[in-house]
Image (tube, helix red, strand yellow):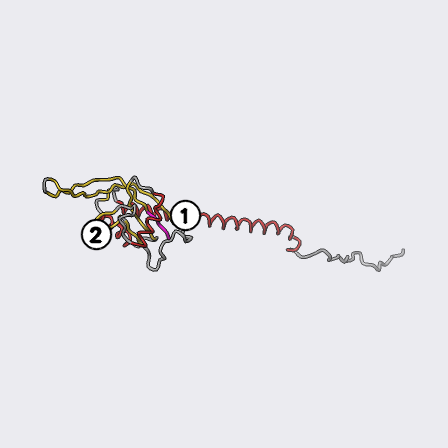
Amino acid sequence: MLVGVCTKPFTRRVALSKRGFIGPIGDDLPSLVPLVISLLLFFSIFTLTLDTYNSKNFFINKQIEMTSAAREIKGDSLILNIDQFMKKCRTVSGKNFPYNFMVGIYGADSDLRTTVTDLLSLQDNGPDPNNPILSASLAGSMQNYFCVYKHIGARPFSQNAKTTYLLRYYPVAVQQAITRTVNGATVTEYLVIPGVMAMVVWE
């Protein structure tokens, strides 16, 4: 009985071609590209949404601060005299109000289209009896129902500059003292007239 001797191994290692094999990450590259693009898109939209939210939130906070300051200046909406008005303005200014502001009071029948110009004129030139903003006697001289508050180092408001500002109107009533002579005696009477308080706030 003949026994054959096999000179070849039963198994042999087949050499595999490594061409086309990039590695574990390289093989998954086609699936990673859309994932990375999706993440970039997500964070871009998230950042844009957050910026929009912060901008709107800042604007709302500014309006809340403005309304709070206006409420404190006008009180119960009855302005008894110009001295009271100026004291309330100084009170708001003394609380480190976070924004600059100008406030003026008009008669209810005034043309409000020139509000910013009227306020700027008083800011730059001082009291003016011809200004549409109401005026009254204070410390022996005529003063307008106008006050301005600016931070230390703040630039003056300029309508021509690219200044973001808020302009709001609030109904008020102003008590005006009228002095007249009756039967040789001086009589002081008080007249309450409807008015509008204009407020400009800027940074």
Relative placement, left or right, of 76 versus 5 is: left
Is residue 200 on the magenta stretch? yes
Label 1 is placed on what type of residue? Asn
* Residue 172 picture location, percent across and down: 27, 41
Residue situated in front as seen by the camera: 180 or 11:
180
Is residue 171 on the magenta stretch? no
Q: Identify the element where label 1 is drawn.
A: helix
Dividing the image into 4 quarters, which one contains the N terminus? bottom right
* Residue 70 picture location, percent across and down: 30, 46
Q: How many marks?
A: 2
Relative placement, left or right, of 62 versus 15 is: left
Relative placement, left or right, of 30 versus 194 is: right
* Residue 160 picture location, percent across and down: 40, 52
Label 2 is placed on what type of residue? Ser
Q: Which residue is mark 2?
A: 141
Q: Residue furthest left?
A: 184
| Image-quadrant location for residue 108 | top left
Rendered image: mark on residue 57: 1
- Residue drawn at (62%, 51%) of the image: 33
* Residue 176 picture location, percent across and down: 21, 43
How far is mark 2 from mark 1, CA to CA?
Answer: 43 Å
Span of residues in magenta: 199-203
Rendered image: mark on residue 175: none
Q: Identify the element where label 2 is drawn.
A: strand
- Secondary structure mainly formed by the magenta segment: strand
